[in-house]
Image (tube, rainbow, N blue to C red):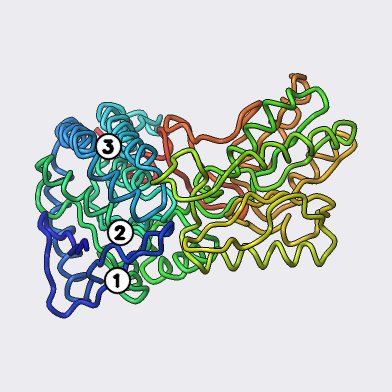
């Protein structure tokens, strides 16, 4: 069985006093690994290492920092089989998908390395003729990166690559459900030859994670997680007024107009809902269908759901895999049961399968109402509620009648309808005639309770900077 220790100051540090975090394969429920939970001494060691390292790291030119990131991208690619194996075992993904995630993490690392010569400030006109105003972009310092379980390899690099290129050091807390792949990434950091202390990766309890986030040397906390986790981070950030960047829950609406390619829309929506068992922040979570094609579209969705088998992806990579743990499965099944009690009609799925593994079948619900929990709250699983509408204005109103605002989708061949929705949707992203995929040169930022700040692109990179105004009188 695999055994992991924390990565501090460029080495794997064994602690005699550490408790162990058990890691399970969600498809087989087998205990596959143990990771040492960081002690308070471990956390202080990591913070001190990161603080010392950052003072030297920030003084390197951005081009020099980029060279390290390019080496890290190469290391991620070369170690992708090992990273992918660890990720597949702990997440239930297929080996191919998990390995590709490591390769894609290398791609986003290279992308941010190429910002080295583009971290730009501003020259601002002064009211005084003999004066220049120079606005500089500077690193924040030590950044705490809190990583989710669903795409733990890609998200880890999505966080640390822009933090590093802008001159920060990082302390990473991977999800306790999926820590093994993070420690494989630590090996890539070693292989890339990073200076000591710039990247630190530790598994933590809630108490030690709070210790990191509330330490005065930590200047920024970046999280991808639930709204509840985001509220907790905001509490932590108040202690030292640390900057927060939060990518939180989503409830992606998909609007399907009567003129849409219904076959394409059904295939893509079901794929979005069943990829990684629906455990994606931007997965389609509710569908609004124009009433004239509602029955036809329900038939198409039902056929797509029926064709989607679920099971252990290590045995058949084409199947839909498991949820991350039993608690997630119970919560989702209870949501479905409450929806049915409240009047929803179960078209397919909606049961807990026999046997091992945290599997849940693709589930389709009709006869739903806008005020139902299943429509209002994030499911984070392979369950899809569908509602009819009369006009595009009504569909837009329903899509916006929500606490979340991360991603959104519309299928239509009418550019006027598409642009009306695009200009009025209350969400950080809208995808027209396709489902969400988070292009890393874009900007992944939520509205409402879906977050503060964002990831990706120029604006995601600048999240990891602060400004200094230099007033130069001559």
Query: Please, is residue 370 above or below residue 288 in the view?
Result: below
Task: Identify the mark nearer the N-term, 3 or 1.
Answer: 1
Image coordinates for residue 112, horizontal then vertical, percent:
31, 33
Q: Is residue 304 depicted above or below 30 in this figure?
A: above
Q: Are marks 1 and 2 in contact (CB under 8 Å)?
A: yes
Under circle 3, the secondary element is strand
Q: Which comes before the other along the chain, label 3 or label 2?
A: 2
Residue 413 visible within the image: yes
Q: Residue at left 38%, top 62%?
A: 177
- Of 460 and 31, nearer the camera is 31
Dot 2, crowdedness within 10 Å: few (<14), some or many (≥20)? many
Q: On the image, numbered disc 2 is attached to which residue?
A: 179
- Rendered image quadrant of residue 308: top right
Per the image, the residue denoted by label 1 is 21
Question: Residue 25's spot in the image, x, y percent?
Answer: 37, 59
- Residue 59 image position (x, y, % from top left): 14, 43
């Amino acid at each position: 069985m695999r055994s992991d220790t924390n990565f501090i100051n460029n080495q794997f540090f064994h602690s005699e006093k550490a408790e162990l975090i058990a890691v399970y394969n969600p498809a087989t429920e087998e205990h596959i690994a143990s990771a040492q939970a960081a002690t308070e001494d471990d956390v202080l060691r990591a913070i001190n290492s990161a603080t010392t390292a950052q003072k030297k790291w920030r003084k390197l030119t951005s081009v020099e920092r980029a060279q390290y990131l390019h080496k890290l991208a190469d290391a991620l690619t070369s170690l992708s089989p090992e990273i992918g194996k660890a990720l597949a075992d702990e997440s239930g993904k297929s080996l191919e998908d998990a390995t590709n995630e490591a390769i894609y993490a290398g791609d986003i690392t290279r992308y941010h390395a190429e910002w080295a010569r583009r971290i730009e400030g501003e020259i601002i006109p002064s009211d005084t003729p003999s004066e220049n105003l120079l606005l500089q972009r500077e690193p924040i310092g030590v950044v705490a990166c809190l990583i989710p379980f669903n795409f733990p390899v890609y998200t880890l690099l999505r966080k640390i690559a822009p933090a590093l290129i802008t001159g920060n050091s990082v302390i990473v807390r991977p999800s306790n459900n999926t820590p093994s792949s993070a420690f494989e990434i630590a090996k890539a950091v070693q292989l890339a030859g990073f200076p000591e202390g710039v990247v630190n990766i530790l598994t933590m309890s809630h108490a030690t994670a709070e210790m990191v986030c509330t330490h005065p040397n930590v200047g920024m906390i970046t999280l991808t997680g639930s709204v509840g986790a985001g509220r907790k981070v905001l509490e932590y950030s108040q202690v030292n007024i640390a900057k927060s960047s939060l990518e939180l829950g989503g409830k992606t609406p998909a609007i399907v107009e009567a003129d849409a390619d219904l076959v394409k829309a059904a295939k893509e929506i079901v794929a979005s809902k069943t990829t990684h068992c629906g455990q994606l922040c931007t997965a389609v979570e509710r569908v609004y269908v124009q009433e004239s094609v509602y029955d036809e579209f329900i038939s198409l969705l039902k056929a797509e759901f029926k064709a989607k088998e679920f099971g252990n992806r290590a045995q058949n990579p084409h199947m839909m895999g498991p949820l991350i743990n039993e608690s997630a499965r119970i919560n989702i099944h209870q949501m479905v049961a409450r929806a049915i009690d409240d009047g929803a009609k179960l078209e397919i799925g909606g049961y807990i399968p026999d046997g091992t593994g945290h599997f849940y079948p693709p589930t389709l619900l009709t006869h739903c109402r806008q005020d139902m929990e299943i429509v209002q709250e994030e499911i984070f699983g392979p369950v899809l509620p569908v509602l009819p509408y009369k006009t595009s204005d009504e569909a837009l109103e329903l899509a916006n009648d929500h606490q979340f605002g991360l991603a959104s989708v519309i299928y239509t061949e009418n550019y006027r309808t598409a642009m009306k929705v695009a200009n009025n949707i209350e969400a950080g992203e809208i995808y027209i005639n396709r489902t969400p995929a988070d292009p890393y040169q874009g900007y992944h930022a939520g509205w409402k309770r879906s977050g503060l700040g964002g990831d990706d692109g120029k604006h995601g990179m600048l999240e990891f900077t602060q400004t200094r105004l230099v007033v130069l009188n001559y």
